[in-house]
Amino acid sequence: MSTARRPSDGTIDLPWHAEPSFNCFGCSPRNPIGLALRLRRLPNGDHAAETTFTENYASYPGVVHGGIVNVLLDEVMGDTIALVHELLAFSVTLRSRMLLPLRVGEPYLTVARIGGGGNGVLHAEAEITGADDALHVMATGTYQPIRSEQARSLMELDEAAFARVRHYFDHKTLDHATGER
């Protein structure tokens, strides 16, 4: 995203973090129970987040809850769409295939990329690998760009907050069949 900045550690400072009303469970540094994910752009254009889960996110002892794994996937795919297309979107489908469980206390890398789009939606795909490069999870997601009226009603944004983030809404998606927006 053109307004995204790169802190010295190579991560992307997501521009919506500056908006006080955004308290995203996945990426907000202000959410005390959230994941506080930090994304970075890989040389091939994909986006990635490194994560090590604590026991706070476990289901069975030592195993990360599957719902939390899906939050991780959804967040990295959704943020990738936001960064590449300069828009915010709601997830409408998320399909994941868990190949290996994620363990508490072990590092994981989630990598996401744009998978296409058309008919008013965008597609993304992601995978989670462990420190040994073993593939743990594969996922795909479909995302619907958020319209201004949805943002105003669902997010309960006041006029000042809406004015600060309005450029993330009302985008048309590229129809890959015709190449038109």
Image (spheres, grey):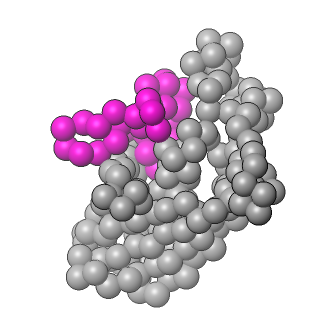
* Residue, far left: 8
- Residue 25 position, x and y percent, is 49, 47
Viewer-closest of 162 and 47 = 47
| 49 on left or right of 116 | left
Residue found at x 51% / y 47%: 84
| Secondary structure character of the magenta stretch overall | loop
| 81 on left or right of 142 | left
Residue found at x 43% / y 25%: 18
What is the total number of numbered labels drawn onto the structure image?
0
Residue found at x 75% / y 29%: 148
Please identify the quarter of the rendering in which residue 104 is found.
bottom left
Decide whether residue 106 is among the magenta residues.
no
Decide whether residue 20 is among the magenta residues.
yes
Looking at the rendered image, the quarter that the C terminus falls into is: top right
Please identify the quarter of the rendering in which residue 133 is found.
bottom left
* Residue, far bottom: 99
* Residue, far top: 160
Q: Which residues are magenta?
A: 1-30
